[in-house]
Amino acid sequence: MSLKEVAVIVFGLFAGYWVVARLLFRRPRDAAGSGPPPSSPVPPSGAEPPWYDVLQVAPDAPTGEIEAAYKHLMSQYHPDKVDSLGQELKDLATHKSQQISAAYREALKARSARP
């Protein structure tokens, strides 16, 4: 391995570390507010999308497809999966899982099936 290749690898590692650090470890804005205040991770409750958008299925999807979509989404957004990643992500996952559960109940009610 030449010196040039080693230099490229080392530069790539530092650049990758810098990008990840910028994306994951942002500092909170100062109290004076040099920009807009940070938004809440939980969107307002009045702007809930329809159940088929939440579950990412067609409005006329069969019950089996709705159940599969529900299980898949809950496996992704369950709050216990992000428990160690901080309170903000846990709050977001809690809201999303509640939204998914409500959409699932609404979908089954629309299909006249029991939740």
Image (cartoon, rainbow, N blue to C red):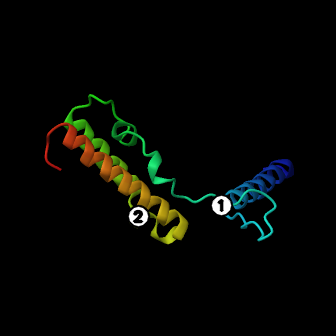
Image depth: mark 1 or mark 2 in front: 2
Q: Nearer the viewer, residue 45 or 82?
A: 45
Numbered mark located on residue 24 in the image: 1
Query: Would you identify the image quadrant in which residue 81 lies?
Result: bottom left
Task: State the image coordinates of residue 65 (x, y, percent, origin top left).
Answer: 25, 36
Q: Are marks 1 and 2 in contact (CB under 8 Å)?
A: no
Query: Mark 2: which secondary structure?
Result: helix
**Which residue corresponds to mark 2?**
79
Left or right? Give the position of 49 relative to 22: left
Q: Nearer the viewer, residue 64 or 12?
A: 64
Residue shown at the point (78%, 69%) measured from the top left = 30
Task: State the image coordinates of residue 4 (x, y, percent, origin top left).
Answer: 86, 48
Task: State the image coordinates of residue 93 (x, y, percent, origin top left).
Answer: 45, 59
Mark 2 is on which residue type? Pro
Left or right? Give the position of 30 relative to 99: right
Mark 1 is on which residue type? Leu
Judge whether 11 appears above or below 66 on screen: below
Residue shown at the point (29%, 49%) measured from the top left = 71
Residue shown at the point (39%, 42%) measured from the top left = 54
Tell me if I can see residue 80 in this picture. Answer: yes
Label located before the other in sequence (1 or 2): 1
Query: Would you identify the image quadrant in which residue 58 lies?
Result: top left
Q: CA distance from mark 1 to mark 2?
A: 19 Å
Q: Residues within 10 Å of mark 2 (few under 14, many from 20)?
A: many
Residue shown at the point (78%, 54%) measured from the top left = 15
Q: Residues within 10 Å of mark 1 (few under 14, many from 20)?
A: few
Task: State the image coordinates of residue 108 (x, y, percent, origin top left).
Answer: 21, 42
Q: Nearer the viewer, residue 90 or 85?
A: 90
Q: Nearer the viewer, residue 115 or 47?
A: 47
